[in-house]
Image (cartoon, rainbow, N blue to C red):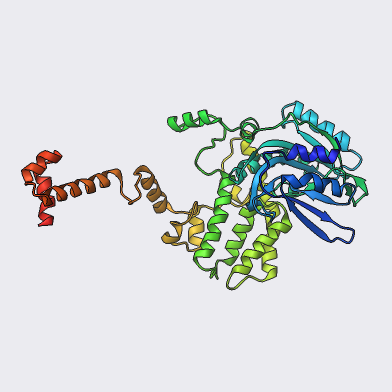
Amino acid sequence: MQGNMAYCQHLFDDTTDGYIEFLKIGKNKEVKIYNTNIKGVKEFVEVVEGEIDTYVAPNTMYKPFRRVKNIRQFRALYIDLDHQEGNQMGVTYQIIELAKQGIIPMPSMAIDSGRGVHLYWRIVNAPYGALHTWQELEDMLYNKLKKYGADIGATDGARLLRIPGTINSKNNQECRLIYNNDEVEYSMYDLREKYLNYKPIKQQLEFVQAKKSISNKVISNNFFNSYSLHISRAEDLLKLCELRKYKVIGHRNMILHCFAYWKGIYTRDIEELEKEVIELNNAFTEPLKECEVNAILRCVPKAIDKFIKYEQGMRNGERKKVTKGMRDKEGYWYKNETLIESLKITENEESQFKTIIGIKEKYKRKNLKRTPRNENGLTSREQQKQNTIKSIQELYKRGYKQVEIVKELNLTKGRVSQVIKKII
């Protein structure tokens, strides 16, 4: 089987759902984008064989617009080892040795990109909701392969990578398949238990019940971890802008700064991140100047690199805590109280957020969770009370005497009398 077809069959099969995006850059730098489903992959790959600079997104989209927020299925983890021209086979063998030592999982596929190596780990497809798990694993691979030339810009879920059988115009070399193993398919949840120091679900439950732990292991449960927190906080910021109808003068710099950083944890393509930040800025009734937006964006890559370093240190079992000093050294760590105060967030606004909430809203949600309510907004006790009142009223209207109602409903005379007095 030809390398380009073996490559596509390794990534895409009958379980593939959503749009697969291909991108082709012509000799005059004109960009053509093609979106297709699984049925159109073979035809496209055959047509572009031997063409220059042709790419595919390994993860599919739910609509034909490639962005992290539009991901339909995660189908692979991947790392781009850049600047390895002439040493592709050598560095591939080094990576295989790392895998044999248990430092990283064994790649299921390796591609000579013409100037480097693209490594893939095929996974059981997962939906957008698994974004934080995918990104944690991607960052683990990046952190461990950084010294081999891993490119942080190629670590977001909407990345495009070269297709075997096409030509890298930078040095006129063919992109080719080094090896692939179709027998290998990983579960992200198994990978995070092994390489991110997570506890399995059974142990998580035992931890919650015991309410204590002496382990270094990361606990994954219904609470937010650092990765999922960033997703939700970015969503809360967008909701805040929407609630205020984008009239955010006095808070624009803080909003864009936080949004760029939180969004940048998942959107590693700087050009794509710039688009999203500029799009938000342009939605403001009075946008910031271009130079002010650029100043915010310049700070993001370094902060994200520090965030990854810190998070991967935690997942390697290091006993670290986020101290006040570390907030300046390891990315940006804002308390909810700080965000609420800086952005002048009201209690009504908090009630519509996922994570940026104060103590009062936090306990309000806890109390609601402790006392489940029905479709009428009543707890079981309140509903029972309403049912009792209704039963008393119906029997009284049917001519029952108080003593008969007491006997019929097994209630006290005082309770029945209390309800009837309100009727009279």
Q: Where's the N terminus, which quadrant? A: top right
Left or right, 409 with reference to 179 = left
* Residue sitting at x 85%, y 52%: 53
Q: Between residue 212 and residue 413, name the one nearer to us.
A: 413
* Residue 156 image position (x, y, % from top left): 70, 48
Residue 23 is at least partly visible in this image: yes
Direction bottom: furthest residue:
286
* Residue sitting at x 58%, y 50%: 230
Q: Where is residue 85, by image quadrant?
A: top right
* Residue 350 image position (x, y, % from top left): 45, 57
Q: Where's the C terminus, which quadrant? A: bottom left
* Residue 187 image position (x, y, % from top left): 64, 33
Direction right: furthest residue:
172
Residue 324 is at least partly visible in this image: no
Is residue 108 positioned above or below 27 on the image? Answer: above
* Residue 132 image position (x, y, % from top left): 61, 44
Q: How many marks?
A: 0
Direction top: furthest residue:
100
Left or right, 413 with reference to 313 = left
Is residue 190 positioned above or below 31 on the image? Answer: above
